[in-house]
Image: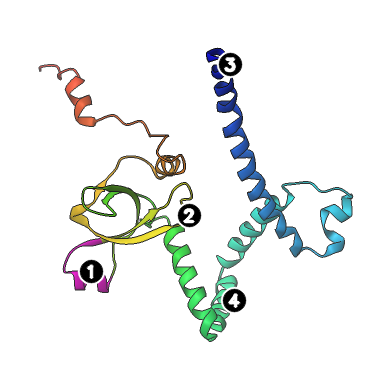
Amino acid sequence: MKTLRKYLVAGLLIWVPLGITFLILKILIGFMDRSLLLLPEAYRPENMLGIHIPGLGLILTLTLLVVTGLLVTNLLGRKILGGWESLLARIPLIRSVYSGAKQVAETMFSEGGQSFKKVLLIPYPREGVWSLAFQTATEVGEVQVKTSREVLCVFVPTTPNPTSGFIVMVPRADVIELDMTVDAALRMIISLGVVVPEWRDPAQDSKLAPPPPRA
């Protein structure tokens, strides 16, 4: 039975990660394949070729993103985009949703942005209990002033689904900044804490290092 169990676990360690990876890729590719619906029905690949080829939507999506970026980075494209945003700004409900979504996108995808670039350890949900969090903002306006403390806005993800979570304002003095990358923290969250990133204490390494040679 021990031998059978060993072989069973070894097989699971191979097939479970492959199955999860395949499932996630299938969902993502299926979602992007819906971009083919933008094409006229007569020009869709399944109608022209007679077969459905998964992944063509991914190519179309990437092409659409690159072409859109190319168009809006020149002078004419910026003028068209400005006129479009001015039109949306006149529609009450859409104005709020679009402006908020645009600010989030600009913050997350800007090269100099700090959102989701740092992994933090914060005392949540109470003192003495620690939770992983991602820094989202350092300037929090009214909250900064009315708390009379330097606070950070952080996102505390849920597990095993890190796309949902809580926004928490935490004093900077109570925050511990970790060395682990965002990818490593996400793997730890998704795995329910089973996958722990490797880490070496720099102070311990300095003790093990040989002393510098004398002049």
The residue under label 1 is 144
Circle 1: residue type = Gln
Mark 2 residue type: Thr
Q: Position of residue 90 (x, y in %)?
A: 53, 86
Q: Residue furthest left?
A: 215
The circle on residue 163 is: 2
- Residue count near mark 1 (Cα–Cα under 10 Å), binned few <14, some 14–19, many ≥20: some
Asked if residue 44 shows in the view, the reply is yes
Frontmost of labels 1 and 2 is 2
Quadrant including the C terminus: top left
Question: Regarding mark 1 in the picture, which secondary structure is present there?
Answer: helix
Q: Which residue is mark 4?
A: 80
Residue closer to the observer: 64 or 125: 125
Q: Mark 1 to mark 3: distance in Å?
A: 60 Å
Compared to 51, does 1 lie above or below?
above
Please state the extent of the stretch shown in magenta in the rendering: 141-151
Mark 4: which secondary structure? helix
Q: Residue at x 55, y 81 (%)?
A: 88
User: Whole-percent x and y of residue 146?
Assistant: 20, 73
Distance between the Cα atoms at labels 1 and 2?
A: 26 Å
Q: Earlier in the sequence, mark 4 or mark 2?
A: 4
Q: Earlier in the sequence, mark 3 or mark 4?
A: 3
